Image (tube, rainbow, N blue to C red):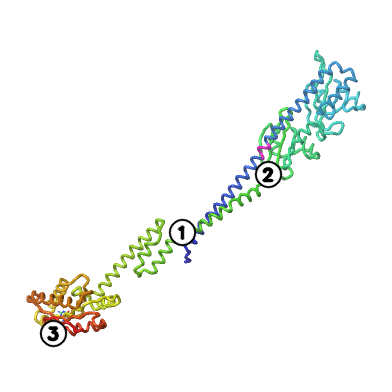
Amino acid sequence: MIKINLRRLILLLTVSTALLTLTYTFYASYRTQRSLLMEQAMETNRAYAIKLASSTDHFLADAQRQLAYSARLLTPLMDQPAQLVAEADRLQQQNGSFNSVFIIRADGTALAAAPRRPALTGVIIDSPGIRAALKRRQPMISEPYIGASGYLLIFISQPVYTADGQYLGYVGGAIYLQEKNVLHSLLGENYYRDGSYLYVVDQQRRLIYHRDPKRVGQVVADNPAIEAVIAGQTGNLQLVNSQGTDMLTGYAPLRRTGWGIVAQRPTAATLQGLDGLMLDVLRHTFPFFLLSVLGAWWMSRVIAQPLSRLANTAQDWDSPHAPEQIRRVRSWYVEAEQLKRAMLAGLAKIHQKLGRLNQENITDTLTGLVNRRGMQAALAQWQAEARPFAVIALDVDHFKQVNDQFGHDTGDRVLQYLARQMRNGSRSNDLLCRLGGEEFCMLLPDCSQETAIGVAERLRTRIAATDSPTGTPITLSAGVSHWPAGGAAVETVLKQADKALYKAKHNGRNRVEAALS
Ligand SMILES: Nc1nc2c(ncn2[C@@H]2O[C@H](COP(=O)(O)OP(=O)(O)OP(=O)(O)O)[C@@H](O)[C@H]2O)c(=O)[nH]1
């Protein structure tokens, strides 16, 4: 299995988390901005359609008021052609509301027209608007229709009655939907430059105003915004228009005529700025992303460091400095501290075990004294430290007889007894050794030969005066030497002690002899 480095793992995890967060934030921010922009555009269009519906309603009401005023003026003038022409001229020119003005007698004969058209004066004009006005005899706004002049128009009319209610005819104004007039300016002047535009439909779904004059008069089917607005609803929605363009629309009806105003903006134009906006977001977010990568890199180092330092110390566990090295590792988080403690505990156990093994290795099992190997190690260290010491070589006299007479077990107990006596008569830093059989040795650091002779003599005397496990005292012989007396080597000094011991044996046993230096 592939093993991944902890630092890389932390780095990888943190960077991928940061990257995921960045991507998600970016995506969420894109979605939010997008729907916000779209909702804003639709709401703006709705508000705009409401405002224009209200302005257009006002305009039509105003046009009707002008005609009503004129109708009142005309009541006494209906048989005065010159006055009628003057009034028609005034109406047409004063406010510019109408492209043309007609004064029609109750039988349908045109009495005056503005702009002046002599050909039409005195004849009966037959057009849907004029016919409808005559028939209704009430103030009215016609449906759009193509007039005698060939223009698509709406006709606004006001009946002329005498004071006693006799119908004399009416005064009416035509607004040419494809020509310049106040209505046109009202709708067209608010045309925005950001791709937005509006159109007006009548109840038959016919375009009666559009920024493209060629489309005026066209009937638009299957457009949900048109369907809603001619049903008298105000609102907004996203739709694909008859030209296949995705649009954000707002719409509002005209109360006076039942027409509908639809303001719209292509969705693509609305969202055009979004890409730039998102690039800006990315530009602003990227330094933070870099910072978090840097932070992740730093964190991965800081987290991995205690573990990797602990791992390094583990390679050197047999070193006596290992515990200190482990203790020095800064474990700043709980898991590293736990690991550190576990390692220290493990190491302590190992060292304890090693120490025990080591101790067993240098200890004589019968007496518990240091064996020959232990003695060699101590001597080497003292020699390295140039530490002077005295050597007392000891040997039980006639030990063979003890064995023979009392048995080997008693012989063993005698050896243990001697070891105890040696311990009783020595200092804590003296090294007491059994080198094999009944051969013993005492190494006394920082001790002169004379003092060592005294120690050996006291031991000999005590042994000779004390009952051993045999029931009677035993005796021992000793030879004493000193290092570095005479500059001899350690081995020589040991041999000198042995020689002195032989001398003591030779001279009758139960005695201490000093080596000649
Ligand atoms: N009980 C016992 N006897 C041992 C041990 N090791 C050696 N011996 C005996 O110690 C005796 C040593 O005898 P020798 O070397 O002849 O010396 P000695 O009898 O003490 O005579 P001298 O040293 O000349 O006084 C032998 O009988 C060994 O078997 C041991 O661990 N236990």
In the image, 90 versus 299, the foreground residue is 299
Please state the total of marks drawn on the protein image: 3
Magenta range is: 41-45
Residue 362 within the segment the image draws in magenta: no
Q: Residue at x 81, y 25 (%)?
A: 132
Residue 302 disc label = 1
Question: On the image, numbered disc 2 is attached to which residue?
Answer: 270
In the image, 6 versus 133, the foreground residue is 6
Question: On the image, numbered disc 3 is attached to which residue?
Answer: 505
Measured from the top left, where is residue 24 in percent x and y? Answer: 56, 50
Q: What element does badge 3 sit on?
A: helix
The amino acid pointed to by label 2 is Thr
Up the image or down, 401 lies above or below 171; here it is below
Foreground mark, 3 or 1? 3
Give left or right: position of 318 versus 506.
right
* Cβ of mark 3 under 8 A from ligand 1: yes
Give left or right: position of 34 versus 381.
right
Give whichever of discs 2 and 3 has the lower sequence position.
2
Which class describes the residues within 10 Å of circle 1: few (<14), some (14-19), or many (20+)? few
Query: Image quadrant for the C terminus?
Result: bottom left
The amino acid pointed to by label 1 is Val
Measure the C-alpha gap from mark 2 to mark 1. Answer: 49 Å
Answer with the quarter of the image where residue 175 lies. Answer: top right
Q: Residue at x 66, y 49 (%)?
A: 276
Give whichever of discs 2 and 1 has the lower sequence position.
2
The amino acid pointed to by label 3 is Lys
Measured from the top left, where is residue 119 in percent x and y? Answer: 92, 27
